Every structure is written in C-alpha cells, then in structure tokens.
Amino acid sequence: MSVLSLFRSGIEGDWLGKAETSERADMIVRLGIGTLCMGELQRLQLEVLDAHTCEMVLAALCIVPFAPAQGPAAGMWSAISGAYTMNLTPDDEGVVALSGTTARGNPVTLTLLRGENDELLLTLLWRVDPAEQHPHRIAAALKRMRPAAPAHARTTRPARKSARRRAR
C-alpha cells in the first residue's frame, strides 16, 4: 500500500491507546496524523506517556512527502535519536512500514496497519545503543479519538411518563 493510499483511506486524525512496551507497563500512545503544506506532506506526531505519571517517555515527528523527488523517504525527528531519514519499505497490503538508521547508526522501524473496527495498529522498534541485545519496542492498538459531545447532549434525559406516574 502506498503512503498516499493509506492516508486517503481515512486515517487522518488523532489516535489514542494503551501500549505494550519492552521496558514499562501502563503506557499511553497518542498518534496525530494530518496534512501539511496544502496536502503535499503527511505529518505523523507520536507521543508515548507513562499512564501513571503522565511523564513523556518518547516524542517523535515524521514528515512524509506524497510525491518524493528522490524516492519514498520521510524525515524523522525523535527526542531520543534526533533527526534522521526513514525509507518506505515494501510490505503487505494494508501496511505502511518506515525504516531508517539514526545518526549514531541505530536502526529504527515504524509500522502502521489499518485494523478492523476503526483501529490502527502501531509498532515501533529502535535501539539506543548498537550493543543492545534486544531492541526497545512499543506496540499499541489505537482507537480514533472522538470529540466530546456538546454539553446539552450529555444532560440526563427526563424520566418516562410511566416512571413519573408511579412516583405520584
């Protein structure tokens, strides 16, 4: 699946979910997806928070061009690894995978899969140190964030007539 077809499939918006990580339990992932520069670029903004302290564990920003001049590459910045380039890697239908190498030579892979029931599956693998035996991992099933209902829609409904009659 191309980046353009994935983003045209309706995944723009904000996504939120609990994450499974290699180091900590109870993490929250927020992924914002939108367009920039009149639709020429796609923005992926990833934030990973500790669910108990709300401490930000990871922040990353990825800019993906829809019509790249030098092949399918994306600019990536993360609070852990700094700036680097990621390339789109061929994958199965319905999957977008970006992989790259940080300035320190550490591999990073980000995968998005459109799931069922308006779900987006995210996997992120990275190494902070090349000597690490196992990569750090974040896996999350994200649900689309929906705007809150207006205040008048959240008010309680009046009791049914039969309930009011019984109360008399």
Image: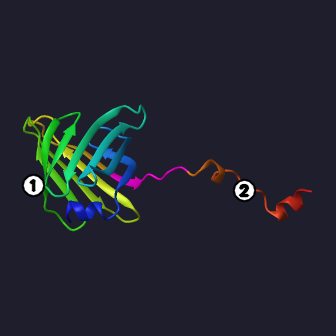
Q: Which of 15 and 167 is in front in this view?
A: 15
Q: Residue at x 37, y 59 (%)?
A: 119
Q: Distance between the residues labelled 2 and 1?
A: 57 Å
Q: Is residue 115 above or below residue 133?
A: below
Q: Is mark 1 on a helix, strand or loop?
A: loop
Q: Is residue 127 above or below residue 160?
A: above
**Residue 24 in the image: x percent, y percent?**
32, 38
Q: Is residue 18 above or below residue 5?
A: above
Indicate the amino acid at tag 2: Arg
Q: Residue at x 19, y 66 (%)?
A: 92
Q: Which residue is drawn at 36% across and 37% down?
A: 49
- Would residue 131 be counted in the magenta stretch? no
Q: Is residue 66 left or right of residue 10?
A: left
Q: Which residue is drawn at 38% across and 50% down?
A: 14
**Residue of label 1:** 69
Quarter the C terminus occupies: bottom right
The magenta segment is 140-148
Q: What element carries label 2?
A: loop
Which residue lies most toward the right here? 168
Quarter of the figure with residue 137: top left
**Residue 61 in the image: x percent, y percent?**
25, 42
Quarter the N terminus occupies: bottom left
Q: Which of 87 and 124 is in front in this view?
A: 87
Q: Is residue 87 left or right of residue 78?
A: left
Indicate the amino acid at tag 1: Ala
**Residue of label 2:** 157
Q: Which of 66 and 32 is in front in this view?
A: 66
**Residue 66 in the image: x percent, y percent?**
20, 57
The mark total stands at 2
Colour mapping: rainbow
Which residue lies most toward the front here? 38
